[in-house]
Structures are given as structure tokens and as C-alpha cells.
Image: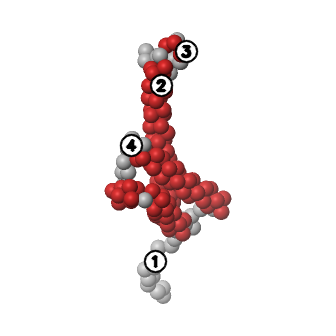
Amino acid sequence: MSTPSTPSSPVRLPIGTPEQFRWLRGVVMAILVLNLLDAIFTLYWVYSGHAREANPLLRDLIDASPLAFVVIKLGLVGYGSSMLWRHRDRPLAVIAIFSLFVVYYALLLWHLGFLGLVLGEQLDSRAALLGPASGVRGRDRRRPGGSGR
């Protein structure tokens, strides 16, 4: 005679090897560095008048105290990252870690692209101020990346 089976909780399979967790730790560290770079670029854009803070919760703080803005921004992302790291054995936490990395990496690319535009405009305006007699030429508008020759 067999006994009826009782429902049991689903078996949780282990995820990740020690090598994969070391790699994932590097991704979490990269998120923290990218967050710091985002804070630095954000301060530059806001105080140079090119942009304003996109996060409405931090927008007033950046005007009141740039140091508090950086500390709170780094603290919030650091805390969230530590919570995700604590649950790194769960697939959803790993997905969230990689998602955060992609978002912060995209933000860095946006900052660098915008920096290129701003620096390009500054170079063009300086070349125009110096004039053709200075030997400094602006970019040729007819050819992408042209030197004006």
C-alpha cells in the first residue's frame, strides 16, 4: 500500500558558480562606479546650465546641497545594489543587476555623447572668434568629421 503524496514546496535549484558570482560582483562594482560618474556629470550639466536633474526626488536636493545630492544618490544605489547582491542566488536579482548595469552604461554613453556636442560647439565658436587668419579651422559642415581643408 502506498501513502498519498503530500504537496511540497517547489525545489529551488542553485544558480551560479563561484566564478559566475565573481564576475557578477564585478558587474555590481561597475554599477557603483557608473553611478558615481553619473553624479559627477549631472553636477557638471546642472551647474553649467545645460541640463537639470531628471529625478524629481533629487532635483531640489542638487540645488540645495550638491554634496548631499552625491551622498544620497550614491547611498541609494549602493543600498539597492547590496540588496540585489544579497539575493544574487535568485534569477530575478541577477536580471535586475544586469538591467541596472545596462541603464547606467547607457547613461554614461549619453553623458559622453552630450559632452562631445558641447565641446564641439565650444571649439566651433572659438574658431569663429579667432577667424581664418589664426590658422585654426572649424569643422567642415560638408563632410562629417572634416577638418575644414
Q: Which mark is residue 126?
A: 2
Vertical placement of residue 93 versus 128, above or below: below
First-in-chain label (2 vs 1): 1
Q: Is residue 139 visible?
A: no
Q: Which mark is residue 49?
A: 4
Vertical placement of residue 97 versus 105, above or below: below
- Residue 64: quadrant of the picture: bottom left
Q: Amino acid at mark 4?
A: Gly
| Outermost residue, left side | 56
First-in-chain label (3 vs 2): 2
Can you give x and y, in whole percent of width and height, for residue 59 in the image? Answer: 36, 55
How would you rate the neighbour count of disc 1 (Cα within 10 Å): few for under 14, some for 14-19, many for 20 or more?
few
Q: Amino acid at mark 3?
A: Gly
Can you give x and y, in whole percent of width and height, for residue 103 in the image? Answer: 45, 50
Label 3: which residue? 135
How would you rate the neighbour count of disc 2 (Cα within 10 Å): few for under 14, some for 14-19, many for 20 or more?
some
The span from disc 2 to disc 1 (Cα, nearest Å) is: 70 Å
First-in-chain label (2 vs 4): 4
The span from disc 4 to disc 1 (Cα, nearest Å) is: 56 Å
Can you give x and y, in whole percent of width and height, for residue 143 in the image? Answer: 46, 16
How would you rate the neighbour count of disc 3 (Cα within 10 Å): few for under 14, some for 14-19, many for 20 or more?
few
